[in-house]
Image (cartoon, grey):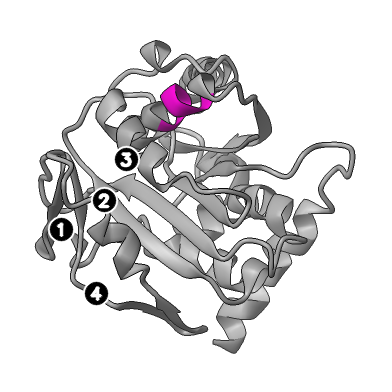
Amino acid sequence: PDELARQVRGFLAAAGEPDPALPAPKAIIAPHAGYIYSGPVAGRAYAQIAGLAGRIRRVVLLGPAHRLPVIGLAYSRAERFLTPLGAIPVDRAALAGLADLAQVQESDPPFEGEHCLEVQLPFLQLTLGDFDLVPLLVGDADPEAVAEVLARLWGGEETLIVISSDLSHFLDYAAARSMDTRTTQAIEALDPARIGYHQACGRIPVNGLLVEARRRGLHARTLDLRNSGDTAGPKDRVVGYGAYAIG
């Protein structure tokens, strides 16, 4: 726990203070690779909420299912998520409130060994302190189906939405920069139609957020855009990482 906290606090400190002239985000998009690769970029997203401890009491966390196929969105039977920094209670009442939606199912197996939600949790614990978690894995779903779930969970200023997604995978440095720039422009335009299969592993939850954000008249801004060639890896085969705030 001490090493984890030191590392995550270092990423947050390096990100600097959020611009006080900008509104606090309703949602953030953050990467989910190993911390040596994507931690500096994730830190830029989470620095935006560092002053919101006590105000944000619930985090709706969506990410792509990497391990097993999921039809629609899945939640587990877990009552807590554990990290070396402690336990986070799951908002079971919020999940029960999704039971009537055809695209949502209870399924434990996709969560076994799945990293995309869990790597976000230490950042949330060190920025927000105590909060309840609504964890959902997203598989084969259209953006409207994801947006319907987000609308149900939207809440007020007590609720933060976090989408866990990396960007392009295993292109060379220049090709990745080009593709990730196009993806970033689509996010800034709240235009899910411009984010295709190869542009982001979490494109489905990202696109669902963009649909709902556009409906609500929100705006997206880019906080950071890098890849593993910028942080801790070679440049011939990289993974892209972006940090975005929507509010």
Task: Pick whichever, 55 or 195, lies toward us.
Answer: 55
Is residue 246 rendered to the left or right of residue 136?
Answer: right
Q: Amino acid at mark 1?
A: Pro
Per the model, the C-alpha gap separating discs 4 and 2 is 13 Å
Q: Amino acid at mark 4?
A: Ala
* Residues at marks 2 and 1 touching, judged by CB atoms closer than 8 Å: yes
Labels 4, 2: front one: 4
Residue holding disc 1: 110
What is the secondary structure assignment of the residue under circle 2? strand
Establish if 130 lies above or below 65: below
Which region is colored magenta? 209-213
| Residue 190 place in picture, x, y as percent | 52, 18
Residue at 55% from the left image edge and 25% from the top image edge: 216
Which residue sits furthest right?
21
Establish if 215 lies above or below 165: above
Per the model, the C-alpha gap separating discs 4 and 1 is 12 Å
What is the secondary structure assignment of the residue under circle 4? loop
* Residues at marks 4 and 2 touching, judged by CB atoms closer than 8 Å: no
Residue at 53% from the left image edge and 71% from the top image edge: 131
| Residue 204 place in picture, x, y as percent | 31, 31
Q: Earlier in the sequence, mark 4 or mark 2?
A: 4
Residue holding disc 3: 149
* Rendered image: mark on residue 137: 2
Residue at 45% from the left image edge and 59% from the top image edge: 34
Q: Earlier in the sequence, mark 1 or mark 3?
A: 1
